[in-house]
């Protein structure tokens, strides 16, 4: 395959060809053998051009829906690379622009907003809201408001107030399978299902919040320090003396809808470099119920017998990979 830079989406089509979008703002399709079969798009503001390709959805017949939050619009591209339609998604609430986050099979768009609840010092938490609307922003329905990322801010010194995301904070996330919007509440185990703006299910996933022991916290701090360059470790230790370490660890940190209608939750990792583990929480698949992926692998698509994504090598170069399972 070609070289990629800042990949934002990888999808596998029904014929096993692979579609990749990256910082070039191009949509490129590669044959199962890795040969370039189609390329369209590019940076610009005209039809079929993009400022930032942030998400890619596969529609019926392998047409593609490309979401460009920078231009606040979605573009539908046919398999032959022709532009089918461009729809503005300049959707606002009282606080500003909403970010597209998914699409139901009936064509409704899922939108998300992070609401900052900043304080001058101490711990604070964002709020996530999810709304369902038509592509053009009409017929909005609020699904709910949920806890988002938790942060810690320090204003003990003059100048800009620094803040850090607290590791292990439970983040609420959402994914769409068919016409159901799934919301993972604060990292689980609670899972909610919504259809057309109505809550139809509240379930508890087969996992529980874990409480870290004092020894595990010390190990986590020691391991974190070992990953910091030597010349920065004194400053790192000073910061960690102030920064709270959360000991209540939610079981998961994100949801992903499989292209085969399944729903997957990613286990909350202790280290960003450790292998990823995904658990299937809805639907049947040819994959095992638990899938462990390599280190530094970023997952974008899960199918009946494959996982597709990007792996960073030791030089930080992005390599698109499709991992097949027997």
Image: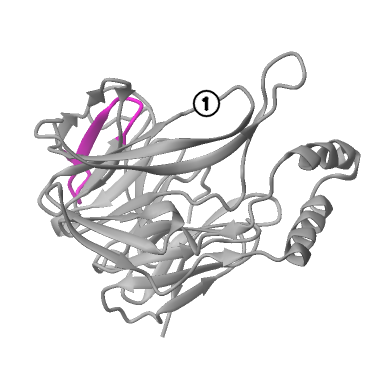
Q: Residue at x 36, y 32 (%)?
A: 42
Position of residue 314 measured from the top left corner of the image (x, y, whole percent): 70, 56
Nearer to us in this view, 95 or 25 = 95
Nearer to us in this view, 320 or 104 = 104
Magenta residues, as a range? 68-83
Q: Residue at x 41, y 85 (%)?
A: 326
From the viewer's perspective, tell me whether residue 87 is left or right of residue 11. Answer: left
* Residue 262 seen in the figure: yes
Position of residue 88 measured from the top left corner of the image (x, y, whole percent): 19, 27
Where 317 falls versus 257 (above or below)? above
Q: Secondary structure at mark 1?
A: loop
Q: Residue at x 36, y 59 (%)?
A: 256
Looking at the rendering, which quadrant does residue 163 occupy? top right
Position of residue 112 measured from the top left corner of the image (x, y, whole percent): 32, 38
Based on the picture, tell me whether residue 160 belongs to the magenta stretch: no
Which residue lies under the disc numbered 1? 118
Where 274 falls versus 140 (above or below)? below
Position of residue 47 measured from the top left corner of the image (x, y, whole percent): 22, 27
Looking at the rendering, which quadrant does residue 285 occupy? bottom left
Looking at the rendering, which quadrant does residue 129 occupy? top left
Q: Residues within 10 Å of mark 1 (few under 14, many from 20)?
A: some
From the viewer's perspective, tell me whether residue 142 is left or right of residue 300. Answer: left
């Amino acid at each position: 395959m070609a070289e990629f830079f800042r990949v934002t989406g990888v999808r596998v089509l029904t014929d096993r060809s692979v579609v990749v979008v990256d910082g070039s703002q191009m949509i490129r399709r590669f044959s199962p053998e890795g040969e370039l079969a189609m390329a369209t798009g590019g940076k610009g503001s005209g039809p079929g051009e993009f400022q930032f390709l942030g998400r890619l959805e596969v529609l019926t017949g392998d047409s593609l829906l490309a979401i460009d939050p920078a231009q606040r619009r979605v573009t539908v591209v046919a398999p032959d690379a022709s532009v089918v339609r461009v729809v503005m998604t300049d959707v606002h609430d009282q606080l500003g622009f909403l970010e597209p986050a998914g699409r139901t099979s009936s064509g409704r768009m899922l939108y998300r907003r992070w609401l900052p609840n900043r304080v001058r010092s101490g711990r604070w938490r964002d709020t996530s809201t999810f709304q369902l609307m038509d592509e053009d922003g009409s017929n909005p329905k609020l699904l709910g408001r949920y806890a988002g990322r938790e942060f810690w801010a320090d204003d003990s010194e003059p100048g800009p107030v620094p803040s850090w995301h607290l590791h292990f904070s439970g983040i609420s996330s959402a994914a769409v399978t068919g016409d159901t919007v799934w919301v993972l509440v604060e990292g689980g185990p609670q899972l909610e299902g919504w259809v057309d703006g109505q809550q139809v299910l509240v379930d508890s996933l087969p996992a529980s919040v874990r409480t870290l022991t004092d020894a595990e916290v010390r190990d986590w701090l020691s391991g974190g320090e070992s990953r910091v360059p030597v010349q920065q470790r004194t400053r790192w230790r000073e910061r960690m003396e102030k920064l709270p370490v959360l000991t209540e660890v939610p079981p998961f940190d994100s949801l992903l809808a499989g292209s085969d209608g399944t729903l997957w939750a990613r286990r909350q990792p202790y280290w960003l470099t450790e292998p990823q583990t995904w658990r299937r929480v809805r639907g049947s698949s040819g994959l095992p119920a638990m899938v462990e992926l390599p280190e530094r692998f970023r997952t974008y698509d899960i199918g009946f017998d494959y996982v597709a994504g990007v792996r960073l090598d030791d030089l930080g170069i992005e390599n698109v990979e499709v991992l097949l399972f027997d």
